[in-house]
Amino acid sequence: MKQWKKPAFWLSTVLLFALLLSACTAAAPAAAPADEAAATEATAPEASASPAEAARPNVVYDLPDLGGRAVSAAMANDYTPLQFIDPGTGEAVGWEYDAVAEICRRLNCTVEWTNTSWDAMIPAINAGQFDIGMDGITITEERAQQVDFSAPYMTSQQFMLVRADDDRFATPA
């Protein structure tokens, strides 16, 4: 299994969602840098930075400041470990909640979660009822005609398992 380095993974994820969230804002777009290298200019942390701030990646990206804007997010809470209801506490938890919270922290926005059914999510986003949807959504041609997708933040493959000594599925029946 490919092992991810945590800072690079989070940074990539934040950038992907920054693009998605910036597409949802009504503010005028910022001027694009003269070249792509300007957008990823490395800088050293300020001397007065706290240890926590100094530990953050020292790469500056031109992320939008959403000025405290509320971002509406749809979630189905049925895909552990990405998002689900904790049976012990009744709270909605999971990786996607954590990722969006971090993205909103970096973009200066707040998230308003709404639990919705999976089959209603994409039509609701397409109709403008939500800014984003998070539910382990697989990109398909049909869905891409209805909504815009960020770059994938994970890939998943499903397989069927059978006993190694069972030949019933070795040939098409």
Image (spheres, grey):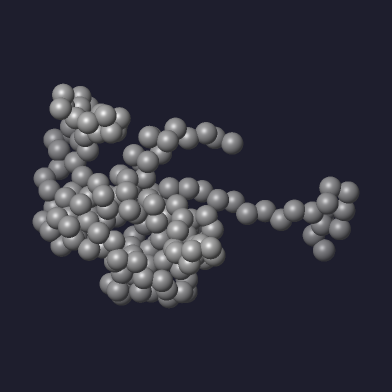
Task: Look at the picture and state if 7 lies above or below 25.
Answer: above
Q: Residue at x 59, y 51 (%)?
A: 157
Q: Quadrant of the C terminus?
A: bottom right
Residue 104 point in image, percent of width and height: 27, 53
Residue 140 point in image, percent of width and height: 47, 60
Residue 115 point in image, percent of width and height: 41, 71
Q: Nearer the viewer, residue 21 or 69?
A: 69
Q: Quadrant of residue 58?
A: top left
Q: Residue at x 12, y 58 (%)?
A: 27
Q: Is residue 124 left or right of residue 85?
A: left
Q: Quadrant of residue 116?
A: bottom left
Q: Nearer the viewer, residue 166 or 15?
A: 15
Q: Residue at x 28, y 72 (%)?
A: 128
Task: Look at the picture and state if 108 lies above or below 52.
Answer: below
Q: Quadrant of the N terminus?
A: top right
Q: Residue at x 13, y 52 (%)?
A: 29
Q: Nearer the viewer, residue 82 or 162?
A: 82
